[in-house]
Image: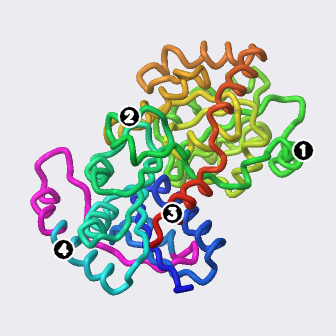
Amino acid sequence: MKKLKFILSGGGTGGHIYPAVAIANELKSRFPEAEFLFVGAEDKMEMQKVPQAGYKIEGLWIAGLQRKLTLQNAMFPFKLVSSLLKSRSIIKEFKPDVVIGTGGFASGPLLQMANMLNIPTVIQEQNSYPGITNKLLSKKANKICVAYENLDRFFPKDKMILTGNPVRQDLIDIESKREEAKQYFKLDSNKKTLLVLGGSLGARRVNQLIEKELDKFKSEDVQVIWQCGKLYFEDYKKYNSNTVQVLAFIDRMDLVYAAADIVISRAGASSVSELCIVGKPVIFIPSPNVAEDHQTKNAQAIVDKIGAIMLKESELDSQFSLVFEALLRDQGKQAYLSENIKALALPNATKQIVDEIVKLIK
């Protein structure tokens, strides 16, 4: 059998990089002899994260269009042409069997060129509301793996398959890890544990809210694991105490989810997918600063199935205390939300996506 070759592209944020790496790992476990190449945007985080995961990466000179008139925008046509030409030479030289895009700037020119050269392409769309790049690419893609229902208003229906988003496999059975988790984080078994997730960089508005509510949590006998993000750690580490743990980032996500009774989280696509699998009661606070308000739409898709609570940043001052207290006191509601969000989990996403990729190998 000939040696298979795959090119993957996903970047800009962990939400695009992690799924691409998960797909590569699954392909590698099925085809240990296969060759892999990642393509990213030159100055984005994939240039560090992908080599850390053990894969080679090439960078394109590409960036997104800004919402206003800037020098960046004036340069865009040149960057696009440069990226298309470089993508063409990468594909011609590497000769991939399939090209896979998980979103981010670099996947646009790469998959566009693969389509022009008649190489099969697969798109993996994490969000409930697709970005411009994937909408454009979907016309020529062979398969589109989606994480939410009702995306046929954006994508051709006959190419779509509902797979879910790739998630860490160690999250599949966290209930069995609850005791280990409590010891790992040195938690008091008689107190409820609140987990706050602001994303890898952190979330300013969420951090301000938690700072304001710390005394309230203490009076309610709630212990807090507060992932404030590396941008904000210096500002908030002073609140570390026996009931509050302030962390820049969390190494053992499986254990922190196992320990949590209630979660407050942003609503990035990969966080939402993880929280469905974990099945804890969640209050989503979507970031309003993302393209096309993705996060609000991701959270709304869960709220519509009565699987979570959503508060917009503008509602935090007036609503948060009431909503949090009501949830904390209502065991029935906690159980109900857990059950409903868990019903939305798609734990076999990575395997299903790779099944679709394998079907396209000529």
Res 345 → quadrant: top right
Name the N-terminal-most of marks 4 and 3. 4
Q: Pointer 3: what residue?
A: 359
Question: Marks 1/2: CA distance?
Answer: 36 Å
Q: Amino acid at mark 2?
A: Pro
Name the N-terminal-most of marks 2 and 3. 2
Please identify, in this view, whether the residue under mark 4 or under mark 3 is nearer the observer.
3
Q: Amino acid at mark 4?
A: Ser
Q: Which residues are magenta?
A: 51-79
Name the N-terminal-most of marks 3 and 1. 1
Name the N-terminal-most of marks 2 and 4. 4
Q: Pointer 2: what residue?
A: 288
Please identify, in this view, whether the residue under mark 4 or under mark 1 is nearer the observer.
4
Left or right for 13, reference 334:
left
Please identify, in this view, whether the residue under mark 2 or under mark 4 is nearer the observer.
4
Q: Amino acid at mark 3?
A: Lys
Where does residue 95 sit, x and y in percent of width and height? 37, 82
Query: Foreground: 296 or 216?
Result: 296
Query: Which element is circle 2 on?
Result: loop
Question: Marks 2/3: CA distance?
Answer: 38 Å
Q: Give the vertical position of 333 relative to 207 (above or below).
A: above
Q: Quadrant of the C terminus?
A: bottom left
Residues under numbered marks 4 and 1 in contact, where contact means CB atoms less than 8 Å apart: no
Mark 1 burial class by Cα count in 10 Å: few <14, some 14-19, many 20+: some
Query: Foreground: 17 or 49?
Result: 17
Q: Amino acid at mark 1?
A: Glu
Determine the residue positioned at 64% across, 71% down.
30
Query: Foreground: 153 or 62?
Result: 153
Res 91 → quadrant: bottom left
Residue 248: in sight, yes or no?
A: no
